[in-house]
Image (cartoon, rainbow, N blue to C red):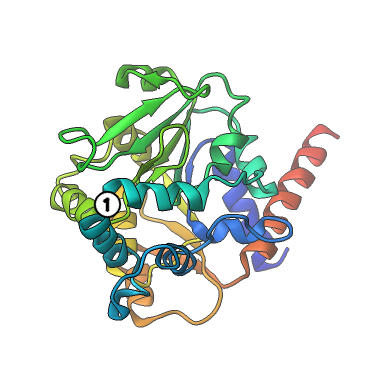
Amino acid sequence: MDKTDTLLNEIIAHLEVGGIVPYLGPGVLDLVPGGSPVPNSPAALVQQMVAKSSVPHKIRNNLTAAAQYIENFKHRKTLVGHMTDAFTPEVSPTFLHEYLASLPRKPLLIVDTWYDNAMATALQSRLLSGQLQGVSQSEHFGTWIHYFRPDGARADPFEADTWDTLLYKPLGSIAPAKNFLVSDTDFVEVLTEIDIQTPIPAIVQQLRTGRHFLFLGCRFRNQLERTFARQVMKRSSDIHWAVLPGELTRNEARFLKEQNIQRIDMQLDEFARLLVGASQDNKVAAAA
């Protein structure tokens, strides 16, 4: 058995007993057959946004700054409208989303840090599931999280204690209520409180305790990406994994070392297919 097989079996073993929190980034949409119908990176999103509203040239490639400019000079409703236009196209769950949705109920916690609805769609068949969605203080002052049942209806926070599967969307999502954290102001509000964990739901803090994180489709190039990952995984296990192909930035390498995240230098598509294939092989062998 080579190192890859050993690693896959280790990760699968943890997944099967609920010991891993999958943490998804926009790069997961690279797995959509034929290409993603919605932006699959901050760079793609900001380009779509500035094509509809002009912003100063120096911030045209900065998503949060461009969003803030649009919010300031065009109104929050315009910004929400651009985000809605960007993420309304239907995104069918990829084979990775479907695999994660098939994991045993423990309860299962999945973190998804992009605005599409693919993971939520994959989880719809789980009746005892729900979505925890970050909301903007600009629109819901004093409230950090909204809770939703699989049918999209608002839920009371206490219901989350009864769910066997929780999808945590800290930046919001297109569905069911078009909540988006995307502008500088949105993030300043959250980052002011996140160090003391106020914006992170108590049930997420509870379920992450002692668990490993598996980062899929994520990068850690900027401070925002690193801060969210660091604060969401606080007080979890001391060993994690991240599928990160290609050259790392100095900040990414430092972050991985700081958080004891083992890098898997492999394209996400290759890793995901090996993971799903090995998991299916293990099930066949166990049933034989």
Is 247 left or right of 280, judged from the image as shown?
A: left
Is 19 left or right of 283, judged from the image as shown?
A: left
Task: In this rendered view, identify the residue nearer to me: 258 or 151.
Answer: 151
Q: Position of residue 209 (x, y in %)?
A: 33, 39
Q: Position of residue 267 (x, y in %)?
A: 63, 69
Is 91 left or right of 173, judged from the image as shown?
A: right
**Residue 246 showing in the rendered view:** yes
Task: In this rendered view, identify the residue nearer to me: 196 or 139.
Answer: 139
Q: Is residue 25 above or below residue 176?
A: below
Q: What secondary structure is found at the residue carrying circle 1?
A: helix
Task: In this rendered view, identify the residue nearer to me: 123 or 173.
Answer: 173
Which residue is situated farthest in the right direction here?
A: 288
Residue for point 77% across, 36% down: 286
Is 140 left or right of 27, judged from the image as shown?
A: left
Residue 146 occupies which quadrant of the picture?
Answer: top left
Q: Amino acid at mark 1?
A: Gln
| Crowdedness near tag 1: few (<14), some (14–19) or many (≥20) residues, C-alpha within 10 Å | some
Residue for point 57% across, 51% down: 11
Residue for point 66% across, 41% down: 98
Q: Position of residue 278 (x, y in %)?
A: 73, 51
Q: Is residue 131 above or below residue 196?
A: above
Q: Position of residue 204 (x, y in %)?
A: 34, 36
Residue for point 62% across, 36% down: 122
Q: Is residue 123 above or below residue 246?
A: above
What residue did someone put label 1 on?
Answer: 231
Task: In this rendered view, identify the residue nearer to me: 111 or 240.
Answer: 111
Q: Quadrant of the C terminus?
A: top right
Q: Quadrant of the N terminus?
A: bottom right
**Residue 113 showing in the rendered view:** no
